[in-house]
């Protein structure tokens, strides 16, 4: 007996909305994600942030600047998602009983960041962006 699954991939774009950095799903006829059940913003080559109390220290050392993951099937946070916003839903608990999130850190201008998200229905999104010295957001190819 063969088992098959269905998942989709979508692009995420960073943009300024009402003066705040936000993430929107770029949709097409293959998918229309409307919420996130997990989001992460990290840098591959920039400086690591400093962990705060309650942060997943190993994630911060790997370059994570903000991360929250919620229990499935929770998808209580609609797009657009504002960077650092307090999101809703039951946090995912790992095998060790910890939630392993990272509070939002100040982003550094000129550094490239990756954003990734999980949405309902096995949908996964991602994108890359940079904030210029003037504060403009530039989206980059993945």
Image (cartoon, rainbow, N blue to C red):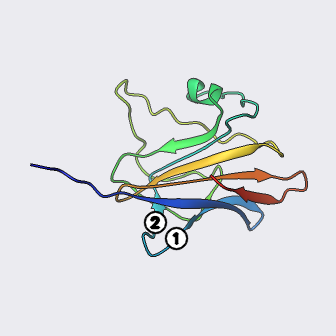
Percent coordinates x, y for residue 90 in the rendering: 40, 46
Label 2 crowd (10 A; few <14 / some 14-19 / many >=20): many
Percent coordinates x, y for residue 51 in the rendering: 66, 27
Q: Which residue is mark 2?
A: 33
Q: Is residue 21 left or right of residue 135?
A: left
Answer left or right for 19 relative to 2: right
Residue occupying the point 77% across, 58% down: 138
Residue 58 is situated, as x and y percent measured from the top left of the image, at 57, 24
Q: Earlier in the sequence, mark 1 or mark 2?
A: 1
Q: Nearer the viewer, residue 141 or 105?
A: 141
Query: CB of mark 1 within 8 Å of CB of mark 2?
Result: yes
Q: Which label is found at residue 42? A: none
When asked about the image quadrant of residue 22, the answer is: bottom right
Q: Closer to us: mark 1 or mark 2?
A: 1
Numbered disc 1: secondary structure: loop
* Closest to the observer, 27 or 70: 27
Q: Residue furthest bottom?
A: 29
Q: Residue farthest to the right?
A: 134
The residue that label 1 is drawn on is 27
State whether residue 34 is above or below residue 109: below
């Amino acid at each position: 007996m063969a088992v098959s699954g269905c998942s989709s991939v979508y692009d995420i774009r960073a943009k300024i909305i009402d003066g705040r950095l936000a993430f929107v799903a770029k949709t097409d006829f293959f998918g229309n994600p409307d919420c996130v059940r997990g989001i992460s913003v990290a840098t591959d080559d920039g400086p690591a942030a400093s962990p705060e109390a309650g942060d997943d220290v190993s994630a911060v050392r790997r370059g994570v600047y903000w991360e929250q993951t919620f229990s499935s099937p929770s998808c209580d946070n609609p797009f657009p998602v504002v960077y650092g916003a307090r999101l809703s839903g039951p946090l995912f608990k790992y095998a060790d009983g910890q939630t392993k999130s990272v509070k939002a850190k100040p982003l550094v201008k000129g550094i490239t960041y990756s954003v990734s998200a999980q949405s309902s229905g096995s949908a996964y999104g991602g994108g890359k962006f940079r904030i210029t010295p003037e504060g403009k957001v530039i989206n980059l190819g993945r």
